[in-house]
Image: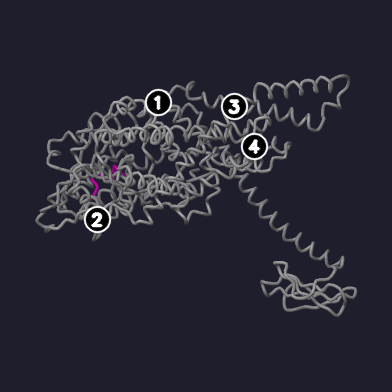
Amino acid sequence: MAPLFGWWQRETHRGTPVIVKMENPNWSIAEIEGEEDEEELVTRDGSFSSRSRKKNAKQITWVLLLKAHRAAGCLTGLASAMVSLGSAVKLRVRSGRSDADPALVPRGENQVVRSRIYGCIKAFLVLSMLLLFFEVAYYFNLWRLGMGGVHVLMDQVHEGWQRLRAEYIAPPLQFLSDACTVMFLIQTMDRVLLCLGCLWIKLKGIKPVAKALEKDPESGSDYPMVLVQIPMCNEREVYQQSIAACCNLDWPKSNFLVQVLDDSDDPTTQTLIREEVEKWQKNGARIVYRHRVIREGYKAGNLKSAMSCSYVKDYEFVAIFDADFQPMPDFLKRTVPHFKGNDEVGLVQARWSFVNKDENLLTRLQNINLCFHFEVEQQVNGIFINFFGFNGTAGVWRRKALEESGGWMERTTVEDMDIAVRAHLHGWKFVFLNDVECQCELPESYEAYRKQQHRWHSGPMQLFRLCLPDIIKSKIGVGKKANLIFLFFLLRKLILPFYSFTLFCIILPMTMFVPEAELPAWVVCYVPAFTSLLNILPAPGSFPFIIPYLLFENTMSVTKFNAMISGLFQLPSAHEWVVTKKSGRSSEGDLVSFALSKKDDSTGLRVGGSVPNLNELVKEEKNTNKKKKKHNRIYSKELALAFLLLTAAARSLLSKQGIHFYFLLFQGISFLLVGLDLIGEQVS
């Protein structure tokens, strides 16, 4: 037969003509079926250009060979991908550092307390592996190969195990499963209502309306005094762009002051930031540098110290930007007017946008969550109840609201949520502006994201313990009290991480070994898919990542559950504060070379400034780089859960539960990838 490439080719094999044309992508193989004088073309989609006839055995053979060739090509690509993944896993296991390493345990942390959840997961894993071995042996009747009465004894043991799980294990497990399912449905209904509220806002075009600033900006008339604060701590990658963005705000210079609140304990970073502030001072900007001698209370302590300055009383509003945030020049002109004529408004919050949302898979998944948080949760709560949690940055406070609410407190790791709740209890209203954006960064490594999420989920539980009596005794309406207690704290901060971890990481694997307790397929597949679809609606461009998003959110549930327990029971890890690592526009290694370049720029980013003692800085930079040796982590809890879920997936094959098997398999692989730190920025 002629080759399969080129123009139309016609060959006769045992009286059957065959036509092949490969140059047209719509035709892969053409066959003549039936008699010698009739031809027929077969397209890739299976359609025919003439009457269908019975297939010749040789024709079927050729078609099967072609399909086998394609399948072999796919398997080769899959095998190559698996080999690459295996190499990455091998390298990670060899060079990675486990989070159980004593050197990585936070200072003051009790290792025994810290390992309790991990110990429980390991116990479940060992038990599940033993049960899997026992069930496989029973399924294939392996013990009947033994001599004597071994098989009789093992049959009795299996019958006893069946009675034990049916009478004593299945009922409480089923009750816990039903309870978590109810929580899941309540939380899903909350998401549905939030989405309907967002849809109503879109259809009606509802948004906060501000009064215009009418008078001459040069004279400063009708432009209130604004204090701009930039709290930072050892954030040398991003300090330049944040200071430049705040100094370039379009507001009368005499009417705003920039406070750089530097809590860095690195002398080199302090010197660089101080010199950057002095450069802007020489260029005419009203900016001051503050560094605390006694660094207590983390960010809350830093802000509290800044508010104690005598000149603060001259400013009516306080705008706060974290070190990686870059407000647009018109930020104050689009936010401050919302206070005019609205004496009850205490906070105007802008949404975040992300300069690195497409950097890797981890940042894409974070973008989905935060888009829903801002566009749905905060916008709906801002429009309908005038309350939401302050995001800690990209917001403008009325100074009077801060003072009446008690000011900044260091009692939790979520000082922003703390001041927002206290201000709400004092009757202040909040405004959220979905159309005003402030650029910032997302954590690009899983380690940084994990620590951020731990702080964000342990802090609210600390705050709930402290604020509950104040909420009950406050003078706000019953509806607002119910919203704070049941929706803001219990449903979204406690129940969500509890059921997510318990239902999908503990109960679902256990039901594979205790089939008398059932978890319906709609709970495992359809409702989670529907919830993920709701979450992804504000970021429609991320729709292709809906399945990774669903799996990753369940994977993160172990971190969120651990953080929630730590905050609720005041464990030592609840007070852990780690500054989220930033990448910045320039990497750590070329920071000094950037200073050496002394580029003149019309925007003022590098005008008229230089770094003193540059030789010493270069030398210290080199020594620091030699000392710093970064490693990817290996996360023990995630790995243990990965093997637990994969073991349960193997057990589900015996009971032929299709959806449960696929969910457990892919969820186990997701835990495995995260446990080996194969998601996000890769170090070495």
Q: Nearer the viewer, residue 591 or 341?
A: 341
Q: Helix or strand or loop: what does disc 3 sit on?
A: helix
Question: In the figure, is residue 324 to the left or right of 565?
Answer: left
Q: Position of residue 363 (x, y in %)?
A: 45, 48
Q: Earlier in the sequence, mark 2 or mark 3?
A: 3
Q: Nearer the viewer, residue 259 or 267?
A: 259
- Give the residue drawn at x 31%, y 29%: 471
Q: Amino acid at mark 2?
A: Pro
Q: CA distance from mark 2 to mark 4?
A: 52 Å
Location of residue 497 with respect to 38 vertically, above or below: above
Q: Quadrant of residue 140?
A: top right
Q: Amino acid at mark 1?
A: Arg
Q: Position of residue 564 (x, y in %)?
A: 44, 30
Residue behind mark 3: 122
What is the residue that sits farthest to the right in this orientation?
A: 14
Residue behind mark 2: 329
Q: Which residues are magenta?
A: 610-617
Task: Select label 2 or label 1 by which is in front.
Answer: 2
Q: Earlier in the sequence, mark 1 or mark 3?
A: 1
Q: CA distance from mark 2 to mark 1?
A: 41 Å
Q: Tell me whether the residue at label 2 lies in contact with that at label 3, contact meaning CB atoms closer than 8 angstroms.
A: no
Residue behind mark 4: 646
Labelled disc at residue 178: none
At label 2, counting other C-alpha atoms closer than 10 Å, the crowd grade (few under 14, some 14-19, many 20 or more) is some
Count of numbered tags? 4
Q: Inspect the magenta stretch and tell me whether residue 521 lies in it.
A: no
